[in-house]
Amino acid sequence: MDQGVIENLKRLYRKQLLRHLLLSGDKSVQSIIDVYSKTTLKDCCYMIAESWSSVRQSTLRSSWNNILARRELSATSGASDPGEVVEEVLFNLNTLSLSGECQKADIEAWLACDSGNPGFQMLDDDEIAESVLNLEDEMDEDFGIQEAQVACPHERAFRCLEVALERLEWQEECHPVKLLNLKSILDLAAKKRTASLKQTTITEFFKEK
């Protein structure tokens, strides 16, 4: 992927991360630290997906133009303005009275803290073999943890989604497309709930698997 697009995505991701920390707890510093320590890989996946959806089409178009040699455009043209992101982050901190001694230069340094990182690590053969073996061990451990976890009951999932949809319908900033997406998830939960409540007949036990 073009480095300009990657840099833009990283900047948007950090903004999403800060937004996640500020909205998930109260205004205390300790609360934000607690939320950060409990942030899971799944939370990060959601944030990176939302960040990717915020990348402007002009940014992606410019990177493709460079690849296809149609015209000489910088991959950063059309990208979100770094100054705009900095101002937005600083505004959010000031709104919650959390800026403290944090200055504009501190935010700029944080957003660009790994600008020199190519995004990958150079490994020799031994290091590659070791990383693969460690990955297999981690996958085995994760599989055991997943087996021990109990899934959320279908009835509870349906009720929670129902309340969430009812709540969001009254929010002016909620886009209709998002409501439709949530409604489709609610319908799926309703089907699973109905299937779980369906009584198993005696013939079901004799069906070939």
Image (cartoon, helix red, strand yellow):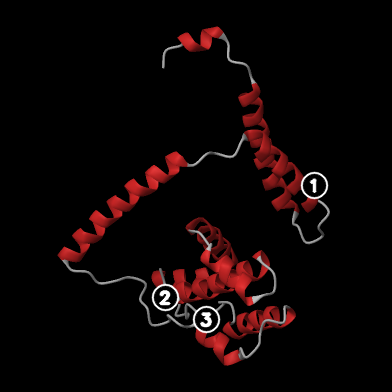
Residue 140 against residue 158 in the figure, above or below: below
Identify which amino acid the numbered label 2 is placed on: Gln
Identify the residue at horizontal 49%, vertical 73% (top origin): 10
Across and down, in percent, residue 158 comes to: 69, 38
- Vertical comparison of 168 with 13: above or below: above
Instruction: State the residue position of label 2.
Output: 3
Asked which secondary structure carries label 1, the reply is helix
Residue 55 visible here:
no
Q: Nearer the viewer, mark 3 or mark 2?
A: 3
The answer to which of 198 and 25 lies nearer the viewer is: 25
Quadrant into which the N terminus falls: bottom left
Mark drawn on residue 111: 3
- Alpha carbons under labels 3 and 2: distance apart: 15 Å
Q: Which mark is residue 15?
A: none
Q: Position of residue 186 (x, y in %)?
A: 68, 40
**Residue at far front of view:** 30
Residue denoted by label 1? 166
Q: Nearer the viewer, residue 113 or 94?
A: 94
Residue 183 visible in rendering: yes
